[in-house]
Image (tube, coloured by chain):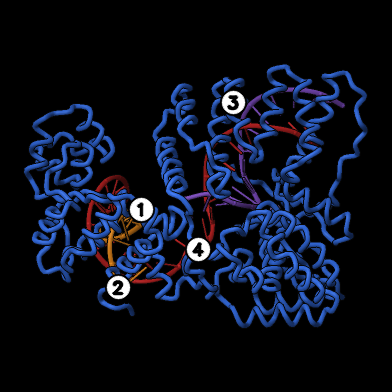
Chain colours: A blue, B orange, C red, D purple
Amino acid sequence: MLEEDYYLTNFRSLVSFVGQTYDGLLTDDEKRWQNAILGASEPAQRLYVRLISRKASIFRLGKLRYPEIRSIEAAALELTDIGLGTTDAPDDIDVLIKAHTKPELLKLLSLSSEQKLSRAALDELLISRNEAGDIELLQQNSDWFGLMGIAEFIVFKLCFFGNCYQDLSEFVLADLGVFNYERYRIDERSRVFQSREQIDDHLRYFECVATWEQTDQSDVQALLALNELLPANKQHDAHLTRRVNRMHNTIARQLERLDRPSDALRLYQQSDKPPSRERQVRVLLKLERAAEAKQLCDTILAEPYADEEIQFVETIQPKLYKLLNLPSPTKTRFRPVTTKLTLKAGNDRVEFIARDFYSQFGECFYVENSLINGVLGLFIWDIVFAPVEGVFYNPFQSAPADFYQPEFVHTRASMLEERFKELDDPLRFSARVWERFEHSRGISNPLVSWHYLSDELLSLALIRIPVDHWCVLFRRILADLRNHTSGLPDLILFPKDGAYEMLEIKGPGDVVQKNQRRWMAYFAEHRIPYRVVHIRWANQTTPA
DNA sequence: GTTGGGATTG
DNA sequence: GAATGTGTGTCTCAATCCCAACTT
DNA sequence: TGACACACATTCAA
Ligand SMILES: [Mn+2]
């Protein structure tokens, strides 16, 4: 159970923290906003926090029900006085419509023949007929309250969380014990943002996301214009760079679909996030600029940003060399070990049916990425949450800020090196994993999905998988945390007579994915037992 | 009435 | 049968309320 | 609120 004023306490704590920590980076508007809301009476603050946590921003006062606020009208008036709201009725027909229910609209606007229209069709009709009378009737039907200062609060949230998807509910869920975050040390001086420019670039990016969602996906000029709006100076901020580059790639991909290869190529060149260079090669081939495509492929091989890029070059090379009339380098394509299996169809998904089948040979678990990632997470838990400077800003992080950056491993290299020595001793390794499993159960960790880890699974895995296998598996994951934490096989089987085997189940029509293939090549290289199992359904008429 | 998808709440 | 592109469901925190749409 | 894995359609070359 929470305190009665939990939401007010959380809001004040977030705002005060940001006000202190970011004193030099806030605009005058933002400081005014902070002073206004923190200086307001308690009922006014309550109403403001209640409403700013909701999805809408304009409300009909009569529909609000907050028993703990004695007079909602008085609170609304106070907020209006201090510039945090308005009691003016909205002019936007769309807002007016959405604030009413369908029966209300039919009654207020005296519509009867429209009753059989769907809600969406009714909205459409009212917007398109654009009658001043409609607007007036809806405006006069209620007392209104429009929230102001939303943009300022967004900045405060952004500074506190470092992102746009966490909000005040984090406080509640953490207090309720729904979310469990590790109690890492937060460096009081460390801030998400170092400069105002950095904050503004982030805000600009989020505006671009909003614009993107409203942009006509066939409007070439609009897409190009949007691309120009994206922040350009982003070297200082790896998270923003990733997001912006992803957006460059997305827009460029859309330009490809609109048959604008040259434009797409230019946009891809602004990004180095895969699959930017892959797309560039494909576009160059489409433009019949094979020589340049070859050059880019060579660049990729000389300095790949991810395994995915190497794999792409290997698949495209035959076509490329043929176009250029070069002697094709003979590549033997990796073939994963594959078997076929016929099973009786059931209602469950194919992975579960296969798991149940293999259970006759021993213990079989549906684990996908969670087992290997999870054991690594348990093994290096304290290193992940080690107090490295500037990576923990607030109590609601499941990972340090640099977790998916290549520097993560470098920054903690000596700790990891030391920890990996424990893999020389299976008992030492196993003890550390078990200890963390018991000690930190339920706490958020970027590598650990607690839901999939059981005592039975863990004990079999730690007994059956030898330490040198764990070691090579871990090393590949750590080589690229963003890309190598996925693609592991569906099932793991621990046969009755010992050892283990990873099984990738493929239903009819499913094929091995690229990242799965890369893991399998690595398995083969390191003699780690795995198999692809293609399932066919036993002979029976399949319903149409 | 019932159902199902949201938004809201703690 | 590859290779490629694109669409979909699944995680969801859980209980409750509101609203739209469907069933008798 | 994405990231993943899978499903399904289309195209192309052997
Ligand atoms: Mn599978």
Same chain, labels 3 and 4: yes
* Mark 1 lies on residue: A26
Same chain, labels 1 and 4: yes
* Picture quarter with the C terminus of chain A: top right
Q: Position of residue A393 (x, y in %)?
A: 49, 64
* Mark 2 lies on residue: A6
Of all chains, the one bearing label 1 is: A
Q: Nearer the viewer, mark 3 or mark 1?
A: 1
Viewer-proximal residue, A480 or A162? A162
Q: Position of residue A331 (x, y in %)?
A: 90, 36
* Mark 3 lies on residue: A264
> Residue at point 39% right, 69% down?
A171
Q: Give me the C-alpha separation between circle 3 and circle 4.
A: 39 Å
* Picture quarter with the N terminus of chain A: bottom left
N-terminal of the two: label 1 or label 4?
A: 1
Same chain, labels 1 and 2: yes
